[in-house]
Amino acid sequence: MDEIILKVNSLEKSFGKNVVLNKISTEIKKGEVVVVIGPSGSGKSTFLRCLNYLEIPTGGEIYFRNDRVGFGKKEKELDLQRSKIGMVFQSFNLFPHLSVLQNLTIAPLSVLKVTNEEAEDRAKDYLKKVGLLEKINAYPRELSGGQQQRVAIARALSMQPEVMLFDEATSALDPELVGEVLKVMKDLAVSGMTMIVVTHEMSFAKEVADRVIFMDGGVIVEEGIPGEIFSAPKEKRTSDFLGRL
Amino acid sequence: MEETLGFWAFSNTIIIPRLMEGMWITLKLTVMSGMIGFILGMFIALMRISRFSPLRWIAVSYITLFRGTPLLLQILFIYFAVPTLVNITLDSFPAGILALSLNCAAYLAEIFRAGILSIPKGQTEASMALGLNYHQTMFKIIIPQTYRRIIPPVVNEFSALTKDTSLVSVISLAELLYVTQRIGAKYLRPWETYVWAAVGYLIIVLLLSYVAARLEKTLLAKGGV
């Protein structure tokens, strides 16, 4: 049960002289839902993007199931690691030239080399989970933002990842569309998926998170169960941030 | 007798039959150089954005060389100078095709590169995050999205190519300009022959634009990005 999926060891990232992450360390256990909050520019997104090596760390280590992420790896091994770490982006990033079905099958077909039938079955399964089976033949531009993001979640799930990263998945959505995406994320959390969620949706953090990490200025200021962080934060910086919401 | 022929009689009996032959050669030059240049240009564009600096360096040199020197010089060099350097003599048709394809590949490479760079970075990131490798990302995700947006500049390049084929008349290739020029000189009736040469080029370019417009529409209907 206490199996560790991701281990982060004094992770550092700087862009030139600008230090974005300053010795971040944490562990993510299987089935855990970790929500990362903090002001803009605190390094939350960069932290998340380092976890699948979209951003190359300038120091420290990340281990995915005891296997060092990225660093010094052959491209093939890195691609394999990435295929087990699902990611959902703020701007959805669906492939606009492919139908919803093709968006969901392209990675299983190209990376896992599953059969067409298997890929299609999977796609239908996950589309059903996000409630969009009837859009299977639509193109991304025909969908609303909320629908696009749900398809993006299904696309990430179609690789059957061991952990899902959400990078401000609802920030680009109209307020009335946020709910449908959060619901899908909640269902996913309930189903036991390991999740790391960068978000400004505090209600989601309160309701769903097993652990909340508050980041500011490139460091983890405070972390704990949502009850503690939201009602009795230990650090002044945390209570300042939460007080301003 | 010939001096007394009117415009249409002269055109119908003397110019148009030869004009058709010339147009056919011009069309062949354009289509074949265009196709070879397209494939070569794609390779050069991929080399130009490669992560391996030697490949980038080769691509940049290639583009600099072929964009930085006159096409006329390139044609003359391939036809007259290359045979003296290596023991290969090219007929004027293959020499013309070679010069035109090498030249238009340099321009097309930059068009393709612009197309690739115009696709948002998030597309590459989403693809990489799913585990697709660099080649899969390029050929399945990025390049297909560039097709529709590169059609206008590619058509531009192809119409420039159509007109540039006239330069191979210097190596006595009987393309459109060459044949009309010869008739004009022979019958001393330059204005009719050059007007017909202009019409010939216009027809070919319009034909190309029409095909491109149809292609653009088809792509738009098919998901259209």
Image: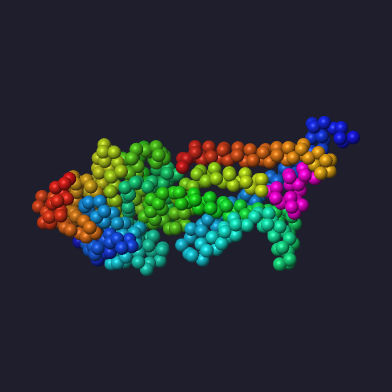
Left or right of residue B88, residue A229 in this image: left
Compared to B64, does B119 lie above or below?
above
Residue under the point 71% across and 57% down: B76
Magenta span:
B165-183
Residue A40 position in % (x across, y down): 25, 51
Left or right of residue B186, residue A84 in this image: left
Residue B212 colored magenta? no
Residue B40 or residue A187, whichever sits in front:
B40
Residue under the point 83% across and 40% down: B188
- Quarter in which the N terminus of chain A is drawn: bottom left
Compared to A77, does B210 lie above or below?
above
Residue B142 position in % (x across, y down): 46, 50
Instruction: Answer with the quarter of the image where residue A51 lies.
Output: bottom left
Q: Residue furthest left?
A: A232
Residue B112 or residue A115, whichever sits in front:
B112
Residue under the point 26% across and 53% down: A41
